[in-house]
Amino acid sequence: MTLCDENHTDPLLDEAADWLLRLQEAPRDARTAEEFETWLARSPEHARAWASIGRSWRLIGEVAPTHEAAWKQRNPTRSRRRLSRGTHPASGWPRRIAGIAVAAACVAFLALSAPSLMLRLQADHLTGTAESRVITLADGSTVTLGADSAIAATVGSHERSVTLLAGEAFFEVRRDVARPFTVKAGEVTVAVLGTAFDVQLTTSTATVQLEHGSVDVGYSREGTSGNAHLAPGEMMRVDRQTGEMSRNPIAKDDIAAWRNGYLFVSDATIGFVAEQLQRYHPAWISVPDRDLAARRVTGLYDLSDPDRALRALVEPYGGRVRAVSPYLRILSRL
């Protein structure tokens, strides 16, 4: 699998993807640039493969590269003529490839920073990448906020409510029959009196893990609703689009395992796990291979070394972790 569309099987596309990564890893290496120019000038098919990789890069990065002209089909005859005149083949490519790396950095910055800026306007408490903190609410309940997470809290004489705006949090709630405690995570609401539980919010699901006590999990979206009751040692994953609820047992030690530096997942997709590891990795993580992203895994991953966790995630399926730059990781089956 390459950076190109997953339906392509042309080996030239694989070669073009490898050239993209090699040039970005060594943008100032004259020999690499010269070898690339030779490869590009071999035939119009080589030029078309390079242009196709450029289009795929734009899809992965969501915005066009700074030097978009670098992706346009090159004239092979012109390339050979320039080489015969003695023009150094590396003269233009370092700048172009550096421009692509800069574009990747800009995309990563926007992807990671823009949501954070919005959260700052809504959140009472939030954390950064790989950061966690313990928050004591006005009623004495505590919230352990996971990495890259945010909450808004309201604790008054008649209500106790927390909205999980992003990420994950573990709640230890002081019992108060007169003031039930509610946690809202997207379309999902968790209602308790006093208990300990974990809530995780992603773009597609909301997950509740119950350590002790009891909780009621409700879903409401556009006329669709549902409710379920959780017992200790159970977890509930709710699809945010459909409201479908799936219940599974979970060992006590695996509940909110991130507090001890580990990520536990049960029958989750690689795309889902990559989204969780994103909160612990300073680089933007992309999984353009839809088939790879849809593979399901169960396991425990070390959050102290997210690159190692990514490798452990995809290597059993023939995947690789490509460090395109300090700001981008691509998971693929190259």
Image (cartoon, grey):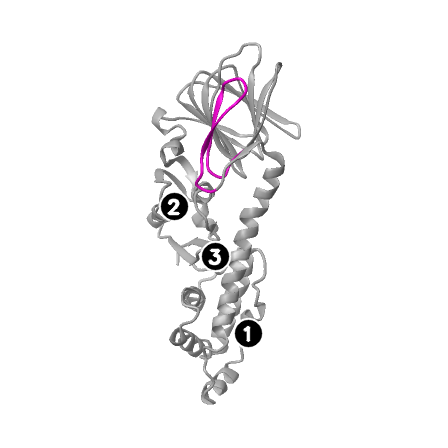
Reading the image, the residue beneath label 3 is 6
Residue type at mark 1 is Gln
Q: Secondary structure at mark 2?
A: helix
Q: Residues within 10 Å of mark 3 (few under 14, many from 20)?
A: few
Reading the image, the residue beneath label 2 is 306
Residue at the outermost top position: 177
Question: 241 or 186, which lies in front?
Answer: 186
Q: Nearer the viewer, mark 2 or mark 1?
A: 2
- Image x and y of residue 173, in percent: 48, 19
- How far is mark 2 from mark 1, CA to CA? 37 Å
Question: 187 or 169, which lies in front?
Answer: 169
Is residue 236 visible in the rendered image? The answer is yes
Task: Please say whether residue 138 is one of the residues in the magenta stretch.
Answer: yes
- From this view, report whether residue 273 is shown above or below residue 99: above
Reading the image, the residue beneath label 1 is 73
Residue at the outermost right position: 222
- Image x and y of residue 54, in percent: 53, 65
Tag count: 3
Residue type at mark 3 is Glu
Q: Residue at the spot x=57%, y=13% of the render?
A: 179
- From this view, report whether residue 169 is shown above or below residue 45: above
- Image x and y of residue 217, in percent: 53, 22
State which region is magenta.
Answer: 129-150
Q: Residue at the spot x=49%, y=87% of the render?
A: 81
Labels 2 and 3: the sequence-earlier one? 3
Labels 2 and 1: the sequence-earlier one? 1
Q: Secondary structure at mark 1?
A: loop
- Image x and y of residue 87, in percent: 47, 85
Q: Secondary structure at mark 3?
A: loop
